[in-house]
DNA sequence: AAAAGGCGTTCCAATATTCGGAACAAGCGT
DNA sequence: ACGCTTGTTCCGAATATTGGAACGCCTTTT
């Protein structure tokens, strides 16, 4: 029943279709908690949104394995709600209402607002690209980014999703999870060999996480993209892990994320990353501190 | 039908048409497109996302007027799906998955990609801020923006929603609607007097739209924000209106949007806007042309 | 201390909604 | 014309949703 970390407790029914990156085996995956009709509709939405091209009805039918009648109704509802858009050739695309939702989510986000000046400072001191991201299940969602070269559009990164197990940010965040939540996340993880350095098994990842937890920072040595390295540190807000915050109720609703400094391998050596590690940890702690102050249970009043 | 603003709507549940009911005259206005459970859940999501501060259960309960049990389940499902996030103090915030959805929606959007170079050109020639937006029901959703001063973060505008009836972009888009669709949009519109120049009634808006349709461009003379003026022109893709595209089926799935040049009143006179109007129309047409070529019914194969 | 009240949560019978197989209606290709 | 594919609609059966009521927990009042 956690807000973020809980990943399918191994329930049974409902073959939810969870699909991620570019094409690959489409075996129906373990279902998440029961979110009823909403979950089924969102599974369809996810499928269409994460495709690389507009999908037609039959394509979606093949991917979702839902009965045609049911699928048709789901798609129809999603289109009516503006979450999907149906083109003149009947193919489905992500709908524009998704942008409106995200605009609110992003502009209202406290962690992003609080972290921003710290990210600027970190960028100023390192000269390389700085990211802020948060962990969701097995993935990192990028919340903000600071970089000098504006050639690549800034916003093109925000909201982007990357696997946690092969990115500095992801590993840093994972290292801050409580054992229970880490185990849940690891159980849902699948290892795709992006580069020669990518972790290929739970064992090697766990060993890496142990070192990261010990040192307080994570290094990504071309594990996700070749020629790209980064150093990252975890940022947790609220209780972060899963201790009780107020009262006796066992709420575990903190956010686990992290910050990172990323650069091309030819310019950023492993030694350079080590040299930055202390700074990155300090900035991460500063953000967590500010968040603890500004994000307290009573952050409503002071806005 | 709205599913956006209002949820239970007080005591509306009478309008249910039971099977076996005798004569049901088609008097039901605008036919509440039933999106079932999904629509109800999204109404709750909308409520929380569009609030200015995190809302607690009782707050939402008061706003939604849904039974507590039902509302609690909806919120629970939304949180489990990552569309909402529940903080340690139990207040609900927009969830991070919304960002991931929007990132895909934005980065995949063809209209935005096609329009980008044209927006750059328009910005280069005018020196003022250029917007691209699309119409959804009664609102304009901003898809892209080009401006020189980077003080305000670029992405802070993307996904933002503004009323259509008092913005240049919105009025331009409305002017391109078919009579039937325009009427539907006007019926759902409510007029809030943002400034002294804001349209206050359907009559004055319709008169304005007639002039806009005739001239091919729309002027916003401080109708939404004081000291802000803009000139806009509509952009339609596909059939745009609601003619049949292929075959006999009456699909009306084109996108209606527009582009605009915006600037502060002290720098951008009404005369200046008129002088730019031809250029804006040309650029809008160029975008529509490119979209017609690059967005054809068979854009799947060539990607 | 006890009572009263607010808040979030859980329970469960009634029922409205979804499910999903099958039939239907249009294209598309041969 | 024919078969085949694709998208849509139908309707009994299955089930998720509904919503009133009760339950803890905590805070405030008496």
Image (cartoon, coloured by chain):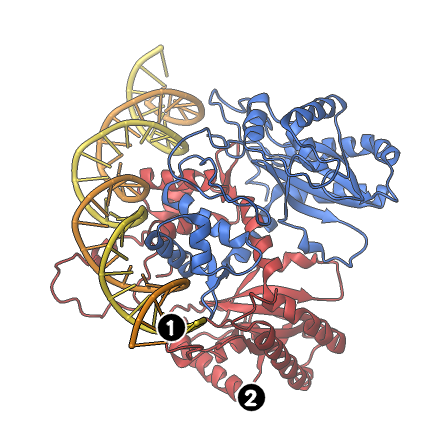
Chain colours: A blue, B red, C yellow, D orange
Neighbour tally class for label 1: few under 14, some 14-19, many 20 plus, Cα within 10 Å: some
- Which of pointers 1 and 2 lies earlier in the amino acid sequence? 1
In the image, taking residue B186 as reference, residue A145 lies left or right, namely: right
In the image, taking residue A140 as reference, residue A49 lies left or right, namely: left
In the image, taking residue A230 as reference, residue B90 lies left or right, namely: left
Q: Which mark is residue B184?
A: 1
* Disc 2 target residue: B215
> In the structure shown, which secondary structural element does the residue marked by tag 2 occupy?
helix
Residue B52 visible in the current orientation: yes
Give coordinates of residue B21: x percent, y percent: 13, 60
Neighbour tally class for label 2: few under 14, some 14-19, many 20 plus, Cα within 10 Å: few
- Residue drawn at x 58%, y 29% as measured from the top left: A186
**Foreground residue among A23 and A282:** A23
Whether residue A69 is situated above or below residue B218 in the rendered picture: above
Whether residue C15 is situated above or below residue B213 in the rendered picture: above
- What is the quadrant of the C terminus of chain A in the image? top right
Residue B5 visible in the current orientation: no
Q: Which mark is residue B51?
A: none
**Foreground residue among A277 and B266:** A277
Q: Do callouts 1 and 2 point to residues on the same chain? A: yes
- Residue drawn at x 49%, y 79% as measured from the top left: B176
**Foreground residue among B33 and B221:** B33
How far is disc 1 from disc 2 in space, using C-alphas?
A: 23 Å
Give coordinates of residue A145: x percent, y percent: 72, 48
Q: Quadrant of residue A260?
A: top right
Whether residue A211 is situated above or below residue A274 in the rendered picture: above
Whether residue C20 is situated above or below residue D6 in the rendered picture: above
Callout 1: residue from which chain?
Answer: B
- Residue drawn at x 69%, y 83% as measured from the top left: B272
- Residue drawn at x 79%, y 40% as measured from the top left: A229
């Amino acid at each position: 029943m956690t807000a973020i970390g809980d990943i399918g407790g191994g329930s049974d029914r409902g073959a939810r279709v969870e699909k991620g990156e570019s094409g690959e085996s489409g075996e129906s995956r373990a279902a998440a908690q029961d979110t009823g009709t909403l979950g089924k509709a969102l599974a369809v939405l996810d499928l269409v949104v994460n495709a690389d091209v507009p999908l037609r009805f039959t394509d979606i039918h093949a991917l979702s394995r839902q009965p045609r009648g049911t699928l048709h109704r789901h798609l129809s509802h999603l289109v009516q709600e503006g979450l999907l858009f149906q083109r003149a050739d009947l193919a489905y695309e992500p709908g524009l209402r998704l942008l409106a939702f995200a605009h609110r989510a992003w502009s209202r986000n406290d962690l992003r607002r609080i972290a921003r000046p710290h990210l600027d400072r970190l960028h100023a001191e390192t000269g390389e690209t700085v990211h802020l991201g948060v962990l969701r299940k097995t993935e990192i969602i990028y919340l903000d980014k600071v970089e000098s070269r504006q050639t690549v559009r800034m916003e093109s990164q925000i909201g982007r999703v990357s696997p946690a197990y092969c990115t500095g940010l992801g590993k840093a965040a994972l290292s801050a999870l409580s054992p229970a939540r880490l185990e849940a996340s690891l159980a849902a993880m699948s290892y795709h060999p992006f580069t020669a350095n990518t972790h290929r098994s739970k064992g090697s990842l766990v060993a890496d996480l142990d070192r990261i937890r010990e040192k307080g920072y994570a290094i990504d040595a071309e594990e996700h993209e070749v020629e790209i390295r980064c150093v990252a540190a975890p940022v947790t807000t609220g209780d972060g892990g899963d201790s009780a915050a107020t009262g006796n109720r066992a709420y575990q609703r903190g956010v686990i994320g992290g910050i990172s400094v990323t650069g091309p391998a030819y310019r950023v050596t492993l030694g350079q990353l080590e040299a930055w590690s202390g700074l990155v940890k300090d900035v991460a702690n500063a953000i967590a501190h500010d968040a603890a102050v500004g994000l307290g249970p009573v952050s409503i009043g002071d806005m």
